[in-house]
């Protein structure tokens, strides 16, 4: 029996386990349903009703929800993401404008939109403005006539035909009346595959420029675009909204997004900074690769570490750029090398490049590092090759014996790319140190340069002992 036949037989044996593990890991994109409307019409109450639990904050005061909040939802075996939004109002100012912006982002990125209207109050000028926006958007829209608590109030919903979004759907989010029928209707509108979750083949790769304030993100964007595309100022925090532009770097077009500087965790930010942080986080999640800028003339800070962690946790390809190299002298280079060894030791896999956005030094080399990171992000190892490599690795460096025996790795497979995700099926729990060793050797032997790697360990239950823990006592 050839090696290929052996691995094919093993793969067939573990097929059910792999599919179950994929489901547990929440594999694949899911459709998005956005709940929008003016303040205090019952959006969060409807979200809680659809979720079947009190998840969204509800209070009898307009404007309690201030940003987009996504929840995992399910109905009739179909999963989707439900997005609760703050109250949308046209021509809003200040914080209300930031709240409205989040609602508009939800409208653009959703597959289905639920416009919630207070049927007892009737259609307001704000409702009419929202309807006009949604009519132009071209997305499937369900008009929800909320607060129809009993059959006697159903005629109130008829007046909402004037919004031009079709037949109003009468419900009571508070009491649950009509919610099951509404969910059935939502499922009819959901696409089989969500739109625009993955970049279109052949289109410009999406690159997010991120980093703490005043590290030179806008200066780099302007240098690459050969234009004053973004406002540059020595005052930290000039950029608030993400700035998108197409730029040509080394003969290839990239879609660059300049983002607001991340000062602190989103939960700890406030005011404009809070919403800027949310939009930056969304830009990272929408990107394929994040270029994280560090100020090479200053020590690597906790803020820098936090930005890098955010990119890694988002599963995006990563390139680290040390900007302001024109300000670095020999002494600073000496200390910077030691800071890199100490502070960046857990992400040695990310490509690094030294540039000066001000003078243009080495900025064209950025394209090469972006391509390298994207190649690692999309790299796949075949099941046969992976298991042959793993068998040799285990023979040379077996798992330490714990409690008189060592767990065995029975089978391994790569279940996804972008980023690469692996599952190890074992006879028992693996030490975290051994899993890190496997990841380190994966990188040494296969590359995956510029990409985070996810390794999940699935311990198989012993046959003949249903319900028993793997390796557990009777």
Image (cartoon, helix red, strand yellow):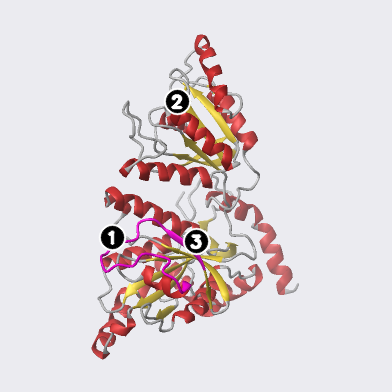
Q: In this view, does 14 lie above or below 106?
A: below
232 inside magenta stretch: yes
Q: Distance between the residues labelled 3 and 1?
A: 20 Å
Q: Which callout, 2 or 3, points to the residue nearer the camera?
A: 2
Q: Position of residue 199 (x, y in %)?
A: 59, 59
Q: Nearer the viewer, residue 239 or 111?
A: 239
* Badge 2 density bin: few <14, some 14–19, many ≥20, Cα 10 Å: some
Q: Is the magenta stretch mostly helix, strand or loop?
A: loop
Q: Which image quarter: residue 298?
A: bottom left
The reply to whether residue 394 is in sight is: no
First in residue order: circle 3 vs circle 1 = 1
**Residue drawn at (35%, 54%), measured in percent from left and top?**
277
The correct choice, above or below, for 194 with respect to 312 in the image is above
Is 463 on the left-hand or right-hand side of 434? right
Going from N to C along the chain, the mark reached first, 2 or 3, is: 2
Of residue 211 and residue 10, the one placed in the foreground of this image is 211
For the residues labelled 1 and 2, the Cα–Cα distance comes to: 39 Å
327 left or right of 87 in image: left
Looking at the image, which residue is at 52% across and 57% down? 458
Q: Is mark 2 on a helix, strand or loop?
A: loop
Span colored in magenta: 225-246
Q: What is the quadrant of the N terminus in the image?
A: bottom right
- CA–CA distance in space, label 2 to label 3: 37 Å
Q: Which residue lies furthest to the right in this view?
A: 1
Mark sitting on residue 263: 1
Q: Residue at x 70, y 73 (%)?
A: 3
- Is residue 246 something one can see in this rendering? yes
- Where does label 2 land, which residue? 124
Q: Name the residue under label 3.
A: 287
Residue 115: x, y in percent? Answer: 51, 32
């Amino acid at each position: 029996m050839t090696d290929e036949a052996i691995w094919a037989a093993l793969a067939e044996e573990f097929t059910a386990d792999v599919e179950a593990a994929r489901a547990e890991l929440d594999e694949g994109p899911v459709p998005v349903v956005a709940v929008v409307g003016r303040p205090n019409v019952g959006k969060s109450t409807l979200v809680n009703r659809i979720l079947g639990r009190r998840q969204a904050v509800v209070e009898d005061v307009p404007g309690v929800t201030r940003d987009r909040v996504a929840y995992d939802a399910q109905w009739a075996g179909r999963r989707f993401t439900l997005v609760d939004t703050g109250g949308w109002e046209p021509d809003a100012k200040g914080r209300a404008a930031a709240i409205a912006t989040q609602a508009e982002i939800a409208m653009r990125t959703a597959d289905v939109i639920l416009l919630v209207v207070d049927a007892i109050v009737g259609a307001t000028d704000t409702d009419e403005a929202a309807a006009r926006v949604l009519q132009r958007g071209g997305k499937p829209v369900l008009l929800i006539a909320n607060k129809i608590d009993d059959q006697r109030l159903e005629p109130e919903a008829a007046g909402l035909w004037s919004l031009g979004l079709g037949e109003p759907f009468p419900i009571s989010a508070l009491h649950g009346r009509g919610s099951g029928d509404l969910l059935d209707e939502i499922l009819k509108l959901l696409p089989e595959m969500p739109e625009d979750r993955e970049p279109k083949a052949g289109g410009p790769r999406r690159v997010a420029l991120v980093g703490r304030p005043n590290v030179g993100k806008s200066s780099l964007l302007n240098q690459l675009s050969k234009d004053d595309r973004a406002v540059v100022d020595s005052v930290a925090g000039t950029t608030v909204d993400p700035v998108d532009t197409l730029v040509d770097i080394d003969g290839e077009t990239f879609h660059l997004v300049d983002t607001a500087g991340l000062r602190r965790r989103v939960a700890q930010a406030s005011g404009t900074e809070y919403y800027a942080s949310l939009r930056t986080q969304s830009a990272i999640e929408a990107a394929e690769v994040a270029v994280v800028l560090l100020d090479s003339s200053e020590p690597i800070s906790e803020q820098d570490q936090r930005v890098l962690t955010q990119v890694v946790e988002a599963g995006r390809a990563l390139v680290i750029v040390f900007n302001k190299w024109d300000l670095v002298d020999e002494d600073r280079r000496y200390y910077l090398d030691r800071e890199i060894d100490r502070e960046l030791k857990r992400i040695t896999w990310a490509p690094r490049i030294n540039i000066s956005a001000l003078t243009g030094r080495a900025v064209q080399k950025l394209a090469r590092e972006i391509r390298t990171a994207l190649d690692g992000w999309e790299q796949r190892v075949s099941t046969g090759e992976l298991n042959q490599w793993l068998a040799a690795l285990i023979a040379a460096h077996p798992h330490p014996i714990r409690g008189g025996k060592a767990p065995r790795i029975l089978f391994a497979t790569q279940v996804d790319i972008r980023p690469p995700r692996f599952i190890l099926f074992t006879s028992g729990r693996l030490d975290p140190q051994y899993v890190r060793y496997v990841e380190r050797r994966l990188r040494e032997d296969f590359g995956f340069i510029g990409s985070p790697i996810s390794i999940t360990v699935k311990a198989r239950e012993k046959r003949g002992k249903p319900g028993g823990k793997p390796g557990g006592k009777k």
